[in-house]
Amino acid sequence: MTQPSTRPSTRTSTRAEQRSARHRPDPQRWPDVATVPTSAVRALVARALLRSVARRLNLRVELPGGALLNRTPPPDGAPVLRLAAPDAFFHRVGSGGLIGFGESYQAEEWDSPDLIALLTALARSPQTLVPPRLQWLRRWFTARQPLEQLGTPENARRNIQSHYDLSNDLFALFLDPTMTYSSAVFPSDSHGEPLASWELLERAQHRKIDRLLDLAGVRRGSRVLEIGTGWGELALRAAARGASVVTLTLSEEQQQLAERRIADAGFADRVEVRLCDYRSVTGRYDAVVSVEMVEAVGRAYWPAYFSTLDRVLAPGGRVALQAITMPHDRMLASEQTFTWIQKYIFPGGLLPSVEAVEQTLAAHTGLRLTGRQGYSRHYAETLRLWRERFTARAAEVEALGFDGVFRRMWTLYLGYSEAGFRSGYLDVQQLLITRLGEDHPR
C-alpha cells in the first residue's frame, strides 16, 4: 500500500509540541504536513488576507477560546472556519497558499462544523479570494507543477498508480457495488433536483453508463474501445449488449479486479482488459467511450489524446466522453498552478473547459463536439454519498493501514470536490464527438 509523498523537507516544525505523538504526522510519509514553514512576513500577510476574505464572503473565523478574527461579527448562520493552531495555519497559508490550506487541515490545525458550507463559500468565487490590488502577491503563493507530473507515457502510469493502486479494498469501502468512481445520474424530482440516496446509487450509476453507451450507439456487434477501465462496470454493460470491448487501464490493481469481475459475469470472451497507455492503442472501433479520464491527461497532451480518438474511430463511429469541466477563464488562470489536489490526490491533472475541448478538436483532429449535457448537481450528490460513507467507515479505513492524515486528506478531497459542483465552479458533462461531415444515426 502506497501513500502520497512529497520531496523530503529539512524544515523543523514550530508547532509540533502542540500535538501529541499519537496525532503527529509521520514525517517520512508526510514531510510537508509534519513540518510548518516559518515566515513572519508571509504569516502576517495571510492573516490580513483571511480577515479580508472573511469580510467579503461573510465567513466566521474562530480562534482558540472562542474569540473571532473578524473585526465585525458575521451574520447568523455564516460558514465557520475554526482555527485550532492559528500561528501554524497562517505560516502554512502564507508560504503555500491553498496547498498550505490543505496541509493545515491534514495536520488538524483547522476544521469546520460544516465543512461543505465553508468550502462551497470559498469555491463560489475563487478568483476573488485575493483582492485585485493584491494579485501581485500570487507569485508568493503559487508553485509550478513539477516536471515529474507531466503526462508523458512514463509519468502517466506513475500518476495513475499513485491514486488508483492505493487499495481496491479502500475504494470498496465507500463506492457502491458497481465499483463505479465517477458521477452517477439520479432520477430527478419535479424541479429537476436529483433524488440521491445510497439505495439509489447503484441504479444511478447504471443510468449514467447506459446513457453514455446510448450516446456512443453501442449495440450488438459494436466494436467498443474504453479509455480508462475503472473496475470494469462500463465494459460489463457494453458486453451485455452484445458488443466486443477493449478497455485500457494503467492500474494493475484495477486490471486484476476488472478481469475477475468480467470473468465472473461470463463475459471474458467479449472483453479484453489491457494494461496500456491510450497513445499505444491499435485497431478501429465503432464506439469510443471514456469516463472522467481526460482530466488526468494534462493540457500538453490533449492533442495526443484527441488525435488518438480520431485515429481509432471507424467511419461513422461515435465518441462519448464524460468529463469534469471548469469555466474557460478559470482553466486559463489555473493551468500553470500546482494545486493541493495535484500534490496529494491526482498528480498531473487539469480539468478542461468545453471551449478547450472544441479548440483542441478543431486544431488537431477531424472530430467535432456535436452534443453535451451537464449533471453538476448529480455529481455533488454522488460525492456527498461517498464522503458520508467514507467518514462513517473511518475505523475500517484505518484497519487497512491508512493513517489519520490520509483520512483527513480524503475527507477534504471529497468535500472540496463536492463544494466545487455545488457552487457551480465545476460541471460534469457527457459529450458527444463525431467526425466532421459524417452522418451518425442513433
Image: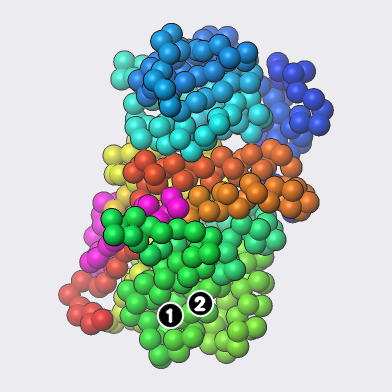
Whether 113 is drawn above or below 46: the answer is below
Mark 2 and mark 1: Cα distance apart in space: 9 Å
Residue 235 numbered tag: 2
Badge 2: few (under 14), some or many (20 or more) residues near its Cα, within 10 Å? many
Q: Which mark is residue 185?
A: none
Q: Is residue 372 magenta?
A: yes
Image quarter (top left, top right, bottom left or bottom right) of the C terminus: bottom left
Residue type of the residue flagged with mark 2: Ala
Q: Quadrant of residue 331?
A: top left
Query: With 115 as the anchor, is 223 left or right in this view?
Result: left
Residue 92: x percent and y percent? 58, 22
Residue at position x 57%, y 46% in the image: 345
Task: Look at the numbered discs 2 and 1 and tell me whether their residues touch, using CB distance below 8 Å.
Answer: yes
> Residue 26 in the image: x percent, y percent?
77, 34
**In front: 95, or 10?**
95
Tell which tag, 2 or 1, sits nearer the viewer.
2
Residue at coordinates 50% horizontally, 51% vertically from top-left? 383
Q: Residue at x 64, y 19 (%)?
A: 85
Observer-nearest residue: 259 or 7?
259
Which span of residues is magenta-colored?
A: 355-381
* Up-down relation of residue 279 to residue 260 (above or below): above
Do we see residue 132 in this rendering?
yes
Q: Is residue 399 left or right of residue 90?
A: right
- The amino acid type found where label 1 is placed reads Val
**SS at badge 2:** helix
Side of 173 relative to 331 (left or right) = right
Q: Secondary structure at mark 1?
A: strand
Q: Is residue 201 magenta?
A: no
Determine which of the numbered discs, if any, sits on residue 224 in the image: 1
Q: Is residue 410 above or below residue 277?
A: above
